[in-house]
Amino acid sequence: MKARFLALALFGSLMLAFGAIAAGCDDTGDGGGDGLTLEEYFQRVDELDNELTEQSDALFAPLEDVQDPDEATDRLREIVPQQGALLQDFRDGLGDLDPPSEVEELHNDVLEAFDELIAGFGDIVGQLDGIESFEDLDALFTDSEFAAADERLTQVCLDAERLAADNEIAVDLNCGEDE
């Protein structure tokens, strides 16, 4: 049971961090030029985030009933690569957006942070066959470049929160910090 909750907590915190970054990037002012307005940008990012959350929840739902750590580890070997594909789709969706000028730099920082995270995720996927326990899987996430990339993504999220606050925009972001 412990393995199930650790896995769900790990991936749940990642998804919340991704959603927070997405929300924070677009909630900071009026857009200009032929790009999206801030409202349109926020709406599209929010749609991407909701889609990612729904897909991730569905992907991890079968783990809710797993009690055996070995079975959880086996299922995670199958799920983790699929989650990587969802993260790539989310990143691609963000990359397709034309952000308002006020958030363009932050938007680019988010894309770079996601690229690093996805690369780290890919490294983990490449090592899945070698894991023998949930602890091995957990170590792949905590003792790898993925952990550094996740930390950078968290920092970009915090930057987004500050930018929103500086512009008197109320956002409820969860930047992957312990609650």
Image (spheres, grey):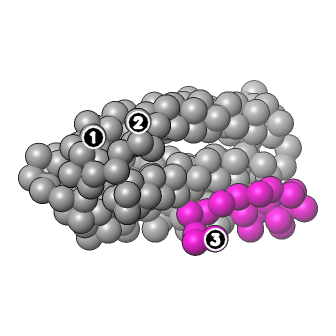
Q: Are marks 1 and 2 in contact (CB under 8 Å)?
A: yes
State the mark number for residue 63.
none
Q: Which residue is mark 1?
A: 75
Which residue occupies the foreground of this view, 54 or 97? 54
SS category of the residue bearing label 2:
helix
Mark 1 burial class by Cα count in 10 Å: few <14, some 14-19, many 20+:
some
For residue 87, what is the image quadrant?
A: top left
Residue under the point 27% across and 40% down: 75
Name the front one of labels 2 and 3: 2
Most extreme residue toward the left, as rendered? Answer: 130
SS category of the residue bearing label 1:
helix
Q: Which residue is mark 2?
A: 62
Which residue occupies the foreground of this view, 102 or 85? 85
Q: Amino acid at mark 2?
A: Pro
Ranked by sequence position, the earlier of labels 1 and 3 is: 1
SS category of the residue bearing label 3:
loop
Span colored in magenta: 160-179
Q: Cα distance, mark 1 to mark 2?
A: 9 Å
Q: Which residue is mark 3?
A: 179
Q: Amino acid at mark 1?
A: Arg
Residue under the point 11% across and 46% down: 129
Q: Are marks 1 and 3 in contact (CB under 8 Å)?
A: no
Q: Cα distance, mark 2 to mark 3?
A: 25 Å
Residue under the point 24% across and 65% down: 135
Q: Is residue 121 magenta?
A: no
Quadrant of the image containing the N terminus? bottom left
Which residue occupies the foreground of this view, 138 or 166? 138
For residue 69, what is the image quadrant?
A: bottom left
Whole-percent x, y for residue 63 in the image: 39, 42
The reply to whether residue 103 is in sight is yes
